[in-house]
Image: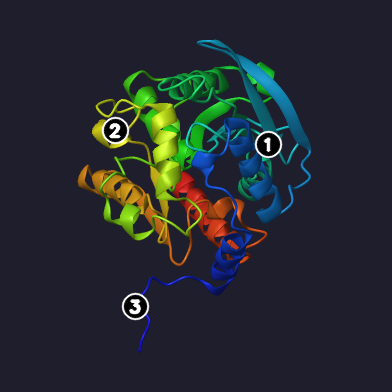
Amino acid sequence: MTDTGPYIRPDMKAFLDGLAAMNGPKIADMTLEEARASYLALHGMADRPARDLAVIRDLSCTGPAGDIPLRLYDAREAREAGPIITFYHGGGFVIGDLDTHHALCTEIAALMDLPLVAVDYRRAPEAPFPAAIEDCEAATRWIASNPSELGREATGIVTIGDSAGGTATIAVGQLLSANPAKAAVVLQVPLFPLASDAMGSASLEEFADGFVLTKTAIEFFDAAYQADRSDPRGFPILGDHSSAPATVCVTASLDPIRDSGRDYAKALVDAGRDVTFLEMRGMTHSFTNLRGAVPSAQGDLERVIAAMKSMLESA
């Protein structure tokens, strides 16, 4: 009898089997502090080590509710004017911070050979929707207009983020299109984003449990973040796609919010925008932070980087 289940790569299956054997508590059963510590521990266990870079420096900028912590990454001490990458971390707008995505940020900065600034936005439930998006927008505007603080001038902004950070990536692109910053968003890279409401989608039901991100966790994040379901900042599929920047949209075939990313890529195609769509077959949500435990995920990240370089060249 043939197996009709979804294709799972062997290294990903080994990782998922290991997670299942650990039989840890569900995120909804943890305290907020435990959930945040667990996310940091997972990435520490499963990701590749951070790269050594010439520049890794903590900064901050003024935001709508106080200073926003930032972290600058660069493989070079000095640069001519050029694009600057702005990174928004994942974690459902509830967990995640500069440290959970530190290794990934070093990798992107090194492979792209561009400066990258990671944004430590306010999180729910302490600061529910739209606090995170307001911080991401404010930080991106600051990055676009403060060459003296960064030691380099931005000729364009490349926005990138995973999961909730992918949502922020799209939302910031829409906000800066409507009200331009000093430097334009020339490329956006939402990684397995929540762009449309995942509730009721086929992928949410098919991959509800056992594939890193669970339906229970999505419901936990949704309840804490409290995004307005009629606001494009919460669900960017509702926004105007007619002026979307060049886009590399990335999904994972085993992700419960996969269909949301597919919806967004289709919206861009329907709007006639320049988009490269990549779906990583046999991979789960968060694969970009599992590159140590799931070695083939490094190749997937390198495919994303190659697409980013190609799109930047033609932008």
Please state which amino acid type lies under the numbered disc 3: Thr
Distance, label 2 to label 1, CA atoms, is: 33 Å
261 vs 215, nearest the viewer? 215
Residue that numbered label 3 is attached to: 4
Give the x, y percent position of residue 105.
64, 42
41 left or right of 159? right
Distance, label 3 to label 1, CA atoms, is: 39 Å
Considering the numbered disc 2 on the image, is that residue within a helix, a strand or a loop? loop
Give the x, y percent position of residue 312.
48, 44
Residue that numbered label 1 is attached to: 99
Q: Nearer the viewer, mark 3 or mark 1?
A: 3
Considering the numbered disc 1 on the image, is that residue within a helix, a strand or a loop? loop
104 vs 248, nearest the viewer? 104
Give the x, y percent position of residue 212.
51, 54
Closer to the chain start, of discs 2 and 1, is 1
Residue that numbered label 2 is attached to: 243
Q: Quadrant of residue 22?
A: bottom right
Distance, label 2 to label 3, CA atoms, is: 41 Å
**Residue in the image at 49% along x and 32% along y:** 93
Q: Is residue 77 visible?
A: no
35 vs 102, nearest the viewer? 35
